[in-house]
Amino acid sequence: MRRNRIFLMLICATFLCSCAPFSREIIRQSDEVLTVRDVQQSPEKYAGRMVLWGGSILETINQKSETVLRILKFDLDMQKKPARSDKPEGRFEIRYPGFLDPAIYESGRLVTVAGKIEGISTALLGEIKYGYPVVRAVEIRLWEKIDPARIPPYWYDPFWGPRPYWDRYPYHPFYW
């Protein structure tokens, strides 16, 4: 009986560890309540703090020694993946030491970063000056694109509609 419990606990721990895209140490160190607006208001107060932020890539700028990603920030779900919504929390910059290909890190892709706050970078956003909080990347995760051609065909069920349940699908009820 005891061996079964230990075996079950090991299996559960393996599944839990395999789900997180970042190490437990990074997640433990990160400040989950820190927002973009807090950093914009007093960047010197939050300099050096570890954050775990994510969002949609707006722009990829390659420089000599680093790559700058401008991100539209969204909340993270349990997998630490950005959840798109109509109310983004603001914008921030990721500074990654090295080269990131703009063809892969293209506009619209979702990314999550673990890194330290460095300060504010001011740039034009339309005709206004916007203060982007700068995050120096420690770990970065690019989420895969969803290809509409790979969505299973049963998502577009032509038999779904306001009919009686026994007439909704042309196959035997066993296949429901």
Image (spheres, rainbow, N blue to C red):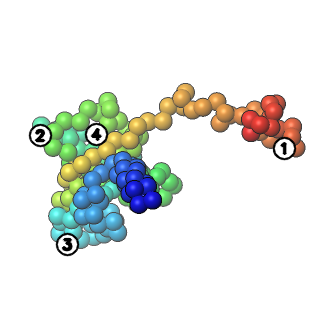
Question: Helix, strand or loop at disc 4?
Answer: strand
Residue drawn 27% across the image and 70% down it: 41
Q: The disc labelled 1 sits on which kind of residue?
A: Tyr
The nearer-to-camera label among 1 and 4 is 1
Question: Helix, strand or loop at disc 2?
Answer: loop
Residue pointed to by mark 1: 165
Q: Tell me, for residue 45, which label it has, or none.
A: 3
Of 93 and 114, nearer the camera is: 114
Residue drawn 23% across the image and 36% down it: 100
Q: Earlier in the sequence, mark 3 or mark 4?
A: 3
Tell me how far mark 4 sits from mark 2, CA to CA: 14 Å
Q: The disc labelled 2 sits on which kind of residue?
A: Ser
Residue 133: tell me if it is visible: no
Q: The disc labelled 3 sits on which kind of residue?
A: Lys
Q: Earlier in the sequence, mark 2 or mark 1?
A: 2
Work out whether 90 lies above or below 41.
above
Residue pointed to by mark 2: 65
Q: The disc labelled 4 sits on which kind of residue?
A: Thr
Work out whether 176 lies above or below 117.
above
Image location (x, y in percent) of residue 141: 31, 44
Residue pointed to by mark 4: 60
- Horizontal relation, residue 170 to residue 101: left or right: right
Badge 4: few (under 14), some or many (20 or more) residues near its Cα, within 10 Å?
Answer: many
Q: Earlier in the sequence, mark 4 or mark 2?
A: 4
Tell me how far mark 1 sits from mark 4, CA to CA: 50 Å
Image location (x, y in percent) of residue 35: 34, 65
Image location (x, y in percent) of residue 164: 88, 44
Tell me how far mark 2 sits from mark 1, CA to CA: 62 Å
